Image (cartoon, rainbow, N blue to C red):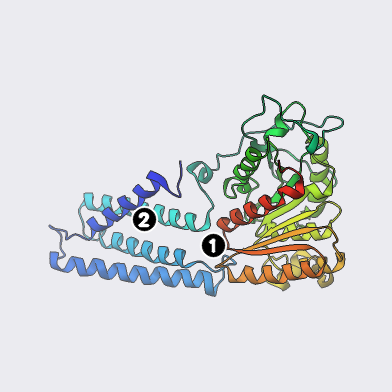
Amino acid sequence: MSIVDGPLFILSYVATGLLLLALLAPRPGVRWPVRRFLPVAVGSALVGAAAGTLLTWLLSDVWDVFGVSLTWVVRIADAVAFAGFAIVLANLISTRLWRAITALVAAALTAWCLFLTINVDFGQYPTVGDALGTTYQDPITPPGVSEGLTALDEWTPPADLPAQGIAGLVEIPAVAAQFEPREAAIYLPPAALTDDPPALPVVIALSGQPGTPTDVFSAGGVAEMMDGIAARNDGLAPIVVVPDQLGDPSNNPMCVDGPFGDSATYLTVDVVDWIRDNLPASADRDAWTIAGFSQGGTCAIQLGAGHPDLFGSIVDVSGEIAPSLGSMQTTIERGFGGDIDAYEAATPIELLRAGAPFTDTVAYFFAGEHDAKYSAFMRAVSAQADDAGMTVTAETSPGTAHDWNTARYGFRTAFDALCERWGITR
């Protein structure tokens, strides 16, 4: 059931609005005179709205709790919600039981509508199942690899070709790396589910931090995107593997080998080896893409620039200009043992300089139109990628900020454009 549109979404706002309007009505039979209650309730709402506005400003612009500036949609929603909470409080003073119960129900619905509004703005949970974490949780058995995979241009779809691919969870163990990953999420296109699959392109995609691998499918919509590509191309689409580059949602190993684990080795050795051993993957580096959103976008350009032998294409959506644990000093001390040279060598710009010239790498960069901070990062890193010889596309996502709406725009745009390079256009 959708929580970004549809009946549940609309009814939630209607019910909340009606309850709050009811709570503004005069209250007979209480110590406050009827004529005084409405001014008190309205005044409380104005104080609540001011408090919500102040709190949002402090969290976003003064303390920078989220690392990005909150949008005006969130700021207005916070002000309206806090106004609703203040109306509820005014109705809990010297009131009858039925009105107190109504006020508490209104408070719960106001909180729910605030969540819905922020969720639409950020694009995190399209459905109830996504919010509850119950989607894309089925285990998948890898199909294995047969000898002599058929080339894409020689493959003929069988009569029993599935209409859609499948997505779920697999274990990708750390072998070479000192790292403890969570389960990975994978998508297998219809062609991979046949008895004689071809050698398919591969996308290694990475979520942000905090996050889980399934975010790329639930919030990023990548499985549906790939099903759309497959529907247009006789069941052909990339295999998508979303490994866990974090180990824990609260950790940020920054896709390097360091105090938080050998994230880089895990992604570029263990994950790559597992894909080659368990999935019908192409051996051509032009068919391999590294992609990611936010912290995952930073990792994508780090790993793509650092391992051009593995990845022919890079998709960096809202990535940072450098790996970060907060301030630069904190990052260097905690993540690199105080070694500033090691820190600088791990930044995308230095990796691009060190690896230049990149003679056959395609790179896509995206940031939200309303995300000034990460748009500036995108311009700086994409310019360096262009200087380093990559074929670069840099775009802003219309009307979005640092959110999964931007990620969906970037992934869809890049993947559609890469179909020809992957060799799956029919």
The quarter of the image holding the C terminus is top right
Q: Residue at x 64, y 35 (%)?
A: 166
| Residue 177 seen in render | no
Q: Is residue 184 left or right of residue 346?
A: left
Question: Residue 183 appears at what percent x and percent y?
Answer: 69, 41
Question: Residue 397 appears at what percent x and percent y?
Answer: 58, 62
| Residue 371 in the image: above or below residue 110 | below
Query: Which secondary structure lies at badge 2?
Result: helix
Question: Residue 205 appears at what percent x and percent y?
Answer: 70, 50
Residue at image mark 1: 400
Nearer to the camera, 424 or 342? 424
| Residue 381 seen in render | yes
Q: Is residue 175 left or right of residue 221?
A: right
Residue at image mark 2: 110
The quarter of the image holding the N terminus is top left
Q: Residue at x 57, y 59 (%)?
A: 403
Q: Residue at x 61, y 71 (%)?
A: 373
